[in-house]
Amino acid sequence: MLEIHNLHAAAGGRAILKGINLTVNRGEVHAIMGPNGSGKSTLAGVLAGRGELEVTDGGVTFQGQDLLDLEPEERARAGVFLAFQYPVEIPGVNNAYLLKAGLNEGRKARGETELDAMDFMALIRDRMKLLEMDDALLNRPVNEGFSGGEKKRNEIFQMAVLEPALAILDETDSGLDIDALKTVAAGVNALRNSERSMVVITHYQRLLNYIVPDSVHVLSGGRIVKSGGKELALELEKKGYGWIETESAPATA
Amino acid sequence: MSTAPETLEELAKQEYKYGFVTDVETDSIPVGLSEDVVRLISAKKEEPDWLLEWRLKAFRVWTTMVEPNWHNVEYSPIDYQAISYYAAPKKKPELQSLDEVDPEVRATFDKLGISLDEQKRLSGVAVDAVFDSVSVATTFKDTLANLGIIFCSFSEAVREHPDLVRQYLGSVVPHSDNFFAALNSAVFSDGSFAYIPKGVKCPMELSTYFRINAANTGQFERTLLVADEGAEVSYLEGCTAPQRDENQLHAAVVELVALDAATIKYSTVQNWYPGDENGKGGIYNFVTKRGKALANAKVTWTQVETGSAITWKYPSCILQGDNSVGEFYSVAVTNNRQQADTGTKMVHLGKNTRSTIISKGISAGRGQNTYRGLVRIGKGARGARNFSQCDSLLIGDRCGAHTFPYLEVKNTSSQVEHEASTSKIGEDQIFYCRQRGLSTEDAVNLIVNGFCKEVFRELPMEFAVEAQKLLGVSLEGSVG
């Protein structure tokens, strides 16, 4: 599904990712953990095609094609979804309208017919139940006046509607209280299947109690310094990130 | 990466989509302006003496006036003696049906996607098509006539309903009102006239499409709408112009008269040729639009201004009667080298008069967008209220937005509120939309349309769709 090979990336001339290697197979959920500033969000941004990030070396293959060669919207239409850490507000633009436009762009790209308003409404009603979304959020402008929790829930709701092949969740747990976290996690889990891969980026192990990953990777200084099973997350929770950074110090020297 | 700021301008290079010229023989008079030219225009139109006298009065006032220079737009001086003040298609057919319209003209409308027969058949819109200065087709007249509604070209109104024209012409915008209005009063060629009788609710949107088509011909349209007591009417004005290399002057006057408890809604989608990306060749649009509202009457202006090299336009409301209401909803777009100085005047004279101003300015490329608005609350306008909101959206970093609100309040029982904001389309917003699968262009359209929503929802449905499309065309190329 996703193969990241020796990925180097910089922002504003400053090197942030310094050789990431990662393979995510179909249906797998990988968690990427790491201290602040380790490059987690940069990795998410590079995969989604954020303009201000510059790939300086290495490559990314997604479903056999060169991901970095695609424009952000082409990646989205090919099935790459990013749940934003900080979802932006777009005043005056109806939430459902944006979603319908995005969904139909994807369908067009796949050679499917566009959904009309009726079919679309049926689809989103169904998905809203999944996220216990309030109807009102649909017809409000995108993220405008949403609470932090509502914004994150809205991201996962969008994912549920767009049904991507690869979902990248960038600190979806940040700013959520425990109830909201459970709802969001339940939504994510409902979308897990043997076809869909996920990369879950988080600072805290807490989220991984609810979204149980197949693999856990620790990102530090722009590299993956340790990989393991879900138990690695628990170990990190106990010991913090310090021991890994110490352990991996020779590698970064 | 293509969302980088330096490429924000890339998309701006799309050519004006409606730039083409129809080859119709034109009956023009030589360039220049004098009393003789005014007389000639009046004679060509076989006008009554009172109208000629009115024109001459306006002309004499105009010669003593100075072109205004207080606006925030720049252009090379206009040589008023280098303009031809009259053009009419040479073949003036007596039309019984649309089939008799010059095929060239028909084709032009088709290119614009506003084919008359389609309009007639599908949309229930009566179209008074102004081609250059003479109306070539009028539809739905019978339906309207049964209700006593008069909707015709200005010239026809002068012939058929001289008393009404004489009573109301210049009653809202006097012949001496301002430089451009005086010029228009002297030389106006044609335009539209509508009269809605007492208590009649006009069953369809009235619509006129304007189009400048003869090179070197200034356009001086005159529109007069009268809604008698308790009447209601919604009027649509939309225009596009063919691509031209020389600046073309357009100085229209629109007068609205809303008698007691009448309602007039006047919507405009303006798409005159804006000039090329260096600002060469666009239309100069100096328009005077004003409505008068008597007791309990309501006048609403909604405008979407995407065209013209220069826009100078302040659709205004004189709230003369008690409890009258004035509204102004505006979207003004400037891209490339376009300049717009537009806004409104709300003059509160009657008691408990209310006005609302919602202005959305969008600047892209090197466009300069100015909102200029006056809210004047007279001594006798006790309990008057105004709410103004002026928002500006910037696309790229070479454009400008300016806001000049003027407030004059002469009593203590009135309430005036003003809100203003300026924002920039964020790369983050565009990226967010692209991550959901939208192209950059669609993302910009979406964001801009969201910004303009409060205005678009005031437009009649089919017009709102057209306005959104136009906005897309106007901003194509502003973000890459």
Image (cartoon, coloured by chain):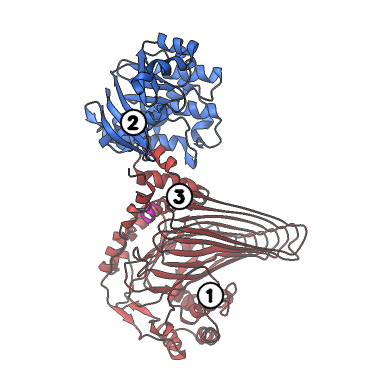
Precedes in sequence: disc 3 or disc 1 = 1
The picture's colour for chain B is: red
**Type of residue at label 1?**
Asn
**With B227 as the anchor, is A191 left or right in this view?**
left
Please give the residue where the numbered disc 2 appears in the rendered image: A47
Q: CA distance from mark 1 to mark 2?
A: 54 Å
Q: Chain of mark 3?
A: B
Q: Chain of mark 1?
A: B
Q: Secondary structure at mark 3?
A: helix
Please give the residue where the numbered disc 1 appears in the rendered image: B69
Residue range highlighted in magenta: B472-479
The picture's colour for chain A is: blue
Please tell me how crowded label 1 is: few (under 14), some (14-19), or many (20+) other residues with Cα within 10 Å. few
Q: Residue at x 47, y 26 (%)?
A: A36
Q: Residue at x 44, y 34 (%)?
A: A96
Q: Secondary structure at mark 1?
A: loop
